[in-house]
Amino acid sequence: MKVSVSQLNAYVKQSLAADAILSDIVVSGEISGLKMHSSGHIYFTLKDESAAIRCAFFKPHSLRLAIKLQDGMRVLARGKVSLYERDGQYQLNVFEVTADGEGLLYQQFEKLKKQLLEEGLFDEQFKKPIPKFVKKIGVATSPTGAVIRDIINVSTRRCPNISIVLAPVSVQGPDAPRSICAGLDALDKMDDVDVIIVGRGGGSMEDLWCFNDESVARKIFACTKPVISAVGHETDFTIADFVSDLRAPTPSAAAELAVFDYYRVLGDIEHFSLALGRQLENAISANYLRLSKLSAKIESPENALSGYEHKLELLKQRLFEGAKREDEENKLSIFAGKLDALSPLKVLERGYSVTVDKDGRIIKDASKTKKGDRISVRVRKGIINAEVLDNE
């Protein structure tokens, strides 16, 4: 009998679906490679000591999930066995997942996490801030992996003057915790290191287990320099992530978080410099305009002195004329006094009189009159009209 690959896979799929046992079966195993898709589908592998099966937990069923799935968790997955025809691989299409006791690694993880949480090692109050302008970073990771290359590439691209010192450590295996602690201790003792990055690339829970070690967690917490953890991929979480001062989803992201963007800062400085220059120019122009307006209102000292000199001359002239006038008035007063003393009226006031003829001429000589002339005699008060009877 001759069939195509598609026909064979379709037949196998129908055969699996027709099997009463395989259409609703509960499989016990430990979750590995958990992936939570944005669509709501969940994919993972169930494994035991010697075998594994792929599982697909589609959205209509995953929405009813009552527990939080984690790598290393031991579960009971109920579903039906089917064939993914495109790849020719069989899988378990999961309907329901319940806890079947927890895997040993997951139990250890949760136990240590709870212990350190209660001791306060995860508290925000102990998180040290990452310096804004880092000059030198220390990296505790494998010297041969992609992590150190990624960190170097990202760091030097962001800041060409950045310095990087590597503390080569083992990041997998039974000796890894001791090696990581030694590397962290060496970097923390370097005075010129501003921040420390510790981490490795992705892997299974077993691969990343050294970052769940209690000694590593306590060493990170004891570091005087801020520590950024960069363990695995974005979905991976370890005890080191919780106790570190900052968690980065990937090693490249850790470099992004630790190293400032030199060119952006330089651009900001140039921008602010230009803006400050414009502000200074505007301020100078505004003050110059104000000064010009004030200067226009202020009379020049030369003009002011010239005006005062003119006023002073006028005052001197008036003072001179006033003094001259006062002198003349004094002389006039003297002359008036003398004239007044010689005035006939003054003589009359002393009892004397003045005699005039009919023409008003003063008669000084009696012989100049004759008997019968009409004369007038002026005394202090009034005039006496008389006739000459005798002129002896």
Image (tube, rainbow, N blue to C red):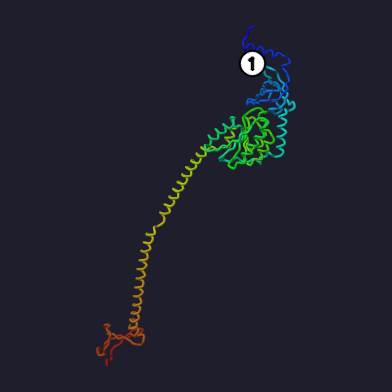
Residue 258 placed where, x, y %?
58, 37
Quarter of the image with the C terminus is bottom left
Q: Is residue 47 above or below residue 140?
A: above
**Foreground residue among 381 and 52:** 52
Residue 278 placed where, x, y %?
46, 44
Q: Is residue 269 above or below residue 141?
A: below
Q: Is residue 21 above or below residue 156?
A: above
**Foreground residue among 91 and 176:** 176
Report the number of numbered marks: 1
Residue 36 placed where, x, y %?
65, 26
Farthest residue, direction top: 1
Residue 287 placed where, x, y %?
45, 50
Q: Which residue is at a point 37% across and 70% down the rendered structure image? A: 319
Is 187 displayed left or right of 341 in the figure? right
Query: Based on the displayed image, in which of its 4 quarters is residue 213 positioned?
Result: top right
Helix, strand or loop under label 1:
loop
Quarter of the image with the N terminus is top right
Farthest residue, direction right: 101
Q: Which residue is at a point 65% across and 17% down the rendered structure image? A: 89
Which residue bears the numbered disc 1?
88
Mark 1 packing: few (<14 Cα in 10 Å), some, or many (20+)?
A: some
Q: Amino acid at mark 1?
A: Gly
**Foreground residue among 342 and 150:** 150
